[in-house]
Amino acid sequence: MGKTVMAAMAVLAWCACLAAQAAPLRLPAGKGPVAQGGSVTAAAQGALIRYRGWLLAVDGAVPQERLDLVLTSADVRQAPRLRIGAMQRSLPVWSAFELVKGNARLRITALPGPDDIPALLLDFGDGDYRIVIPAAPIERQAYPLLAQRFPGADLALLLQDGRRVMLPLGSGRAHVFGEEQTVSFRFAKVKR
């Protein structure tokens, strides 16, 4: 084979690898009806997130039902991680992972957090709802800056006094939910 043909084959193989990386991972859809909207329930340092058939556990939260995805926040030594069944994957800063379950999409992106430890941005649907999960505590006076640092995020799952709390972003007020640890924060698709 000539050098031109081999170079063309190498470029084709490289493009195929990029396309495979960009393709979302497809999970089997549930058999029951899919509820619209979602909820976040704080559970110690973690949270359970439900949205249109998805069930995610963040930082050690344990549900009664079968999980679709487990997310572990970053720390100083390690990038955030995700686990789907037996598959585990690190998410270095600026990397993203996309999943599809039924008709619902989920894109998970690792972004630089205010403390230089990566934060996770969960983007449900086609911009339906966005949740940011900083890995480290943030001072209360810095809460209003989260909407600027993570534009488009609708809710922040913050570490406060050793537990996760929910802070709706973009409302202009910094009212925190979840300090009671039993109350779920309910949300619906946001029109953008």
Image: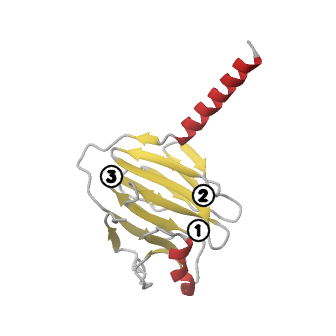
Q: Nearer the viewer, residue 168 or 59?
A: 168
What amino acid type is highlighted by mark number 2? Pro
Identify the residue at image location x=27%, y=58%.
36
Q: Is residue 13 above or below residue 168?
A: above
Q: Which residue is mark 2?
A: 80
Residue type at numbered disc 1 = Ala
Residue 175, image x, y percentages = 41, 84
Quadrant position of residue 15 = top right
Q: Is residue 169 above or below residue 46?
A: below
Quick one: label 2 or label 3, which is nearer the N terminus? 3
Q: Quadrant of the C terminus?
A: bottom left
Q: At numbered mark 3, what does the secondary structure look like: helix, strand or loop?
A: loop
What residue is disc 3 on? Answer: 53
Q: Amino acid at mark 3?
A: Gly
Residue 135: mark in rendering: 1
Q: CA distance from mark 2 to mark 3?
A: 23 Å
Q: Earlier in the sequence, mark 1 or mark 2?
A: 2
Residue at (33, 65) in percent of width and height: 191
Q: Are marks 2 and 3 in contact (CB under 8 Å)?
A: no
Q: Residue furthest right?
A: 3
Q: CA distance from mark 1 to mark 3?
A: 25 Å
Q: CA–CA distance between discs 1 and 2?
A: 9 Å
Confirm whether residue 180 shows in the render.
yes
Q: Residue 16: x, y in percent?
A: 58, 31
